[in-house]
Amino acid sequence: MLKKIFNFYYEGFVNMSKTGKTLWAIIFIKLFIMFAILKMFFFPNVLKTQFKTDEERSNHVIENLTTIK
């Protein structure tokens, strides 16, 4: 069954027009930019930089989730 599903999509992409392939390339480039490049600049790993151990990180997260502000 998985082989049939793979062949269905594979044949669809192989037989796709040049316009369709170009549009899929644009989609993949945009996804790469959104998830790989923007993540580095806008979502830094703050817990790794501020805390040294996993225990300190987990205590900080639990404290912030359970404290009423």
Image (cartoon, grey):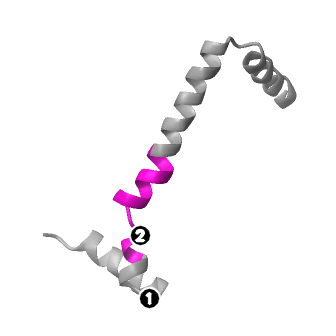
Image quarter where the N terminus lies is: top right
Neighbourhood count class around disc 1 (C-alpha, 10 Å): few under 14, some 14–19, many 20 upward:
few
Q: Which mark is residue 39?
A: none
Viewer-closest of 10 and 30? 30
Q: Is residue 33 above or below residue 58?
A: above
**Which residue occupies 43% across, 60% down?**
40
The tag earlier along the polypeptide, 2 or 1, is: 2
> Who is closer to the viewer here, 27 or 5?
27
Which secondary structure lies at badge 1?
A: loop
Mark-to-mark CA distance, 2 and 1:
12 Å
Considering the whole magenta stretch, tell me its main secondary structure. helix
For the residue pair 50 and 56, the one nearer the viewer reads as 50
Q: Report the residue at 40% width, 86% height from top.
A: 56
Res 60 visible = yes
- Of all residues shown, which one is farthest toward the left? 69
Q: Residues within 10 Å of mark 2 (few under 14, many from 20)?
A: few
Q: Secondary structure at mark 2?
A: loop
Judged left or right of residue 39, residue 63 is left
Q: Is residue 4 above or below residue 42?
A: above
Q: Is residue 27 left or right of residue 57?
A: right
Q: Which stretch did the figure color magenta?
A: 34-47
The location of residue 53, given as percent across then percent down, is 47, 88
Does residue 24 lie above or below 51 as drawn? above
Q: Position of residue 21 (x, y in %)?
A: 64, 20
Q: Which amino acid, by three-letter code, is at mark 1?
A: Lys
Q: Quadrant of the C terminus?
A: bottom left
Along the horizontal axis of the image, is 22 left or right of 65?
A: right
Residue 52 is labelled as 1
Which mark, by number, is residue 45?
2
Please state if 60 lies on the left or on the right of 25 as rendered. left
Magenta stretch contains residue 63: no
